[in-house]
């Protein structure tokens, strides 16, 4: 085992079918009085927001229902102004990574008097498998010179203090979102296992997450209302989020952030297209780690070499993408070939790409990868 450094923030995790019923008790225990909910417009129509507002009772200050994908700065400003006006003392992100990211960005904007260096605490109620609830990271999309660009920050103060995982809230997650955010969670585990800051906690979480998801993801896609499969999958996503929180991600995540922030494609779709390509790009550098990925996915090692197992892991991801009818090419996401050089340049400049286990010395390597995925 090599040296490692971990910072583990205090979080309370409540997991299980019906866990949202514990929300008011958890808030009372924490002593918060005026809570704001940040969520997407379709959350009310699906009944999720009504359920959370009812569970909050007298602690509900206001709901902001304008969350948009990739957290545009404009919406963060609107939500923070609302929170300020209603003197909120905690903020809930209800939904996918965009709702939780908006809640983190609002928390970052609103100080918590009288100690102005503290932040309004965040509570996360995830309804996808994206994993933001376990991390201090959030991205906000800003428009610079007419080009949207997602700027990612990390601040331990916005790591959600309470996370409520209720699989019943995921029963209506549409098949496409189930599949895409599921592959995103798989990608967290893959990049954790070969991360340059790989450590025992993240590796154990990543392997456990892969085991659960290999068992449950396609079942959730084909039978969305299977509570046992949804529970196993959400447990896998929790482990994937835990792995994500404790390692540096690499090339795959760097590229997906640029694709989402700049072209607006859904994060899950970007993940589905890119993951097999990045895994193959890495195969020679981190074959033993990708062999671990394969074994955690349930692939019998037999007498196969690490390189053969790494290829089997890539094939497994490719098969899931095909089985769940996810996009497999960037052109299918509406990305044009002429955009690839700029996207490669932006990805090359990102810190995440620069801390990848296979050193990337030249932007042309990323452009070649994007062309293969196009
Ligand atoms: P999303 O939050 O953008 O949600 C996409 C859509 O799914 C929304 O319209 C939402 O209303 C809908 N939805 C969510 N849950 C639903 C449910 N149960 N039933 C029906 N519809 C539902 O998508 P996402 O993939 O969860 O999150 C992606 C965003 O999160 C990206 O911006 C990504 O960069 C970020 N992210 C951040 C981290 C982190 O650690 N900070 C981790 C993963 C993803």
Image (cartoon, helix red, strand yellow):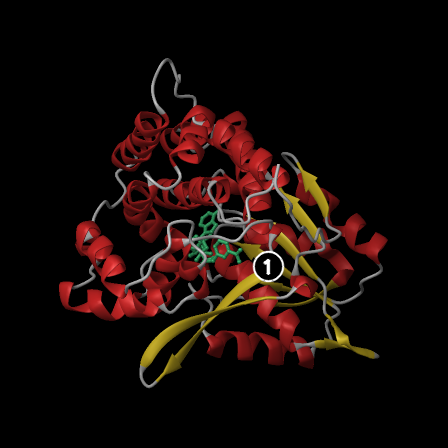
Find numbered disc 1 in the image and state the secondary structure of the residue it sits on: strand
Which one is nearer the viewer's eye here, 259 or 165?
259
Residue positioned most to the bottom:
145
Q: Position of residue 190 (x, y in %)?
A: 44, 40
Q: Position of residue 199 (x, y in %)?
A: 60, 42
Seen at 56% across and 37% down, the residue is: 203
Q: Quadrant of the N terminus?
A: top right
Please name the residue that numbered disc 1 is placed on: 93
Give the side of residue 212 with respect to residue 331, left or right: right
Which one is nearer the viewer's eye here, 370 or 332?
370
| Residue 39 is at least partly visible in this image | no
Q: Position of residue 166 (x, y in %)?
A: 61, 40
Q: Position of residue 259 (x, y in %)?
A: 32, 62
Which one is nearer the viewer's eye here, 299 or 16?
299
Density class for disc 1 (Cα within 10 Å; few <14, some 14-19, many ≥20) is many
Give the side of residue 256 with respect to residue 3, left or right: left
Is residue 154 shown above or below 142? Answer: above
Residue positioned most to the left:
337
Is residue 106 shown above or below 14? Answer: below
Q: Quadrant of the C terminus?
A: bottom left
| Residue 263 is at least partly visible in this image | yes
Seen at 85% across and 60% down, the residue is: 31
Is residue 373 shown above or below 200? Answer: below
Seen at 27% across and 65% down, the residue is: 363
Seen at 53% across and 41% down, the residue is: 240
């Amino acid at each position: 085992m090599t040296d490692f450094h971990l910072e583990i923030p205090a979080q309370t995790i409540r997991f299980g079918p019906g866990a949202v019923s514990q929300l008011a008790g958890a808030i009372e225990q924490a002593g918060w009085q005026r809570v704001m909910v940040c969520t997407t417009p379709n959350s009310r129509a699906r009944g999720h927001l009504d359920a959370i507002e009812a569970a909050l009772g007298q602690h509900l200050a206001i709901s902001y229902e304008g969350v948009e994908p990739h957290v545009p700065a404009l919406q963060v400003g609107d939500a923070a102004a609302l929170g300020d006006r209603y003197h909120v003392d905690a903020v809930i992100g209800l939904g996918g990574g965009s709702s939780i990211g908006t809640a983190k960005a609002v928390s970052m904007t609103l100080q918590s008097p009288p100690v102005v260096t503290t932040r309004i605490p965040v509570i996360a109620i995830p309804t996808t498998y994206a994993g933001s609830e376990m991390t201090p990271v959030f991205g906000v999309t800003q428009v610079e010179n007419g080009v949207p660009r997602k700027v990612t920050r990390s601040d331990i103060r916005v790591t959600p203090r309470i996370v409520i995982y209720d699989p019943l809230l995921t029963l209506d997650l549409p098949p496409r979102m189930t599949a895409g955010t599921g592959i995103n969670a798989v990608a967290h585990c893959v990049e954790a296992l070969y991360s340059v800051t790989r450590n025992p906690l993240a590796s154990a979480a990543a392997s456990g997450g892969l085991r659960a998801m290999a068992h449950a993801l396609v079942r959730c896609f084909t039978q969305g209302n299977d509570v046992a499969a949804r529970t196993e999958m959400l447990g896998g996503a929790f482990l994937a989020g835990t792995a994500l929180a404790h390692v540096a991600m690499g090339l795959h995540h760097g590229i997906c952030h640029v694709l989402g922030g700049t072209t607006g494609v859904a994060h899950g779709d970007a993940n589905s297209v890119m993951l097999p390509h990045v895994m193959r790009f890495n195969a020679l550098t981190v074959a033993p780690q990708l062999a671990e990925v394969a074994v955690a996915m349930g692939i019998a090692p037999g007498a196969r070499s690490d390189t053969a197992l790494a290829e089997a892991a890539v094939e497994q991801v490719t098969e899931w993408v095909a089985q769940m009818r996810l996009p497999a090419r960037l052109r299918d996401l509406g990305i044009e070939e002429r955009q690839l050089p700029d996207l490669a340049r932006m990805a090359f400049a990102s810190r995440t790409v620069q801390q990848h286990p296979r050193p990337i010395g030249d932007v042309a390597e990323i452009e070649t990868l994007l062309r293969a995925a196009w």
